[in-house]
Amino acid sequence: MGRSKVGQLAGFTLVELLIAMALLLAVLTIAFNIFSSSNRLVESDTGRVMAQQNAQTALDLMAADVREAGENLELDLGISGLEFNNATQSLTVRRSIPPLSTGVKLARLPLCYVSGSSVQVVGAVPGSTTATSRCTYSDGNSDGEDDNVMPWRTYLTAQSGVPQAALLYRPASGGTPALVQSTTVQSVQAQTTQVTSGVTVKRVNVVLGAAVPSAFTPANNSLLILVDERRYMLVGSELRLALGGQTDAQAQPMAFGVTGLTLSATLTDPTETVSSMSLTGPFSRVKNIVIGLSAQNAGQGKSTTRTFQSTIFPRNIETARSTPGAP
């Protein structure tokens, strides 16, 4: 009897062992659930943060560009600082080239003579020694280059020779409305000098990315305008950005896992909402632009889709209204 009592005091009964194991299992289950919940929370938070960084950052960049749309592009020109299409999920932001570091602004060059994609912007037409007033060579600072051409050459050199966005512009005349078409400037050719019958003729040609349409001619005072252009486009699940004269294929990704891009504008006089706007506007009627961007996180954390929206008021529209002008 004494040995049996000592054995009971020295060990655990089966019931006690089962209770202990049950308690241990309960503790482990609680610990596992806490760990799993914490892990899911971390993954979810990481996914939300990464999705926000992916989409919100891209949207902020787009909004900043839209806010500056139309800078130094007079409303009288009829050129829109914004061009977008909700159906194709594309947005183009356009503004004038800012002055060079010297303070010199880029002039709008005349079409003096056109041959395919080559536009003569200075000098008499081939076979002549007398230039029109618009095309007369002028070198007021004696640097050996036409005063209007040199800033173009300087700007293109600073862009490392990369093609730049430009516009062909035909002013309105009588009952004929203004006409605008996008193009790219590939290069400004070296100045040529020709002496004919004792008369020195200097010419400069600009090479475009495509042939000049027949609607743009020297006779109707057409112009070539260099512009700063940024094109956003949704390609698959990537939001891409093309700068200057870059092609769609050269556009660089700026957001991944994009599931949607929505674009609209609120216009005034009369008030209406539109889902597209062309190269010719109506930019002067724009009150605000609404951009919505939905995107997933960029590969880290739990897959999460976030949608962000921004309403932008282009600040240059009122400025342009107060400073009308003609090219």
Image: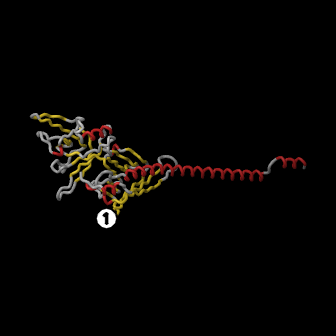
Residue 307: x and y, percent?
Answer: 45, 55
Residue 262 picture quarter: bottom left
Check the image and name the residue furthest to the right.
2
157 shown above or below 308 = above
47 or 63, nearer to the observer: 63
Looking at the picture, tell me which residue is in the foreground, 268 or 186.
268
Residue 283, visible in the rendered structure: no
Position of 207 with respect to 298 (left or right) is left
| Residue 245 in the figure: left or right of residue 22 | left
Query: Which residue is depicted at the point 48% across and 51% down?
Result: 52
Instruction: Identify which amino acid the numbered label 1 is placed on.
Output: Asp
Location of residue 129 in the rendering, given as x and y in whole percent from the top left corner: 12, 39
Please tell me how many numbered marks the rendered image carries: 1
- Tell me which corner region of the image, top left, top right, bottom left or bottom right, holds residue 205: top left
Q: Residue 32: in sight, yes or no?
A: yes
Of the pair 136 and 259, the residue shown nearer to us: 136
- Within 10 angstroms of label 1, few (less than 14), some, or many (20 or more) residues? few
Q: Residue at x 29, y 43 (%)?
A: 104
Quarter of the image for residue 190 reads top left
Colour pattern = secondary structure
x, y percent for residue 12: 80, 49
Badge 1 marks a residue whose secondary structure is loop
Instruction: Estimate the x, y position of residue 185 in percent, counting from the top left.
Output: 26, 43
Residue corresponding to mark 1: 269
Q: Residue furthest bottom?
A: 270
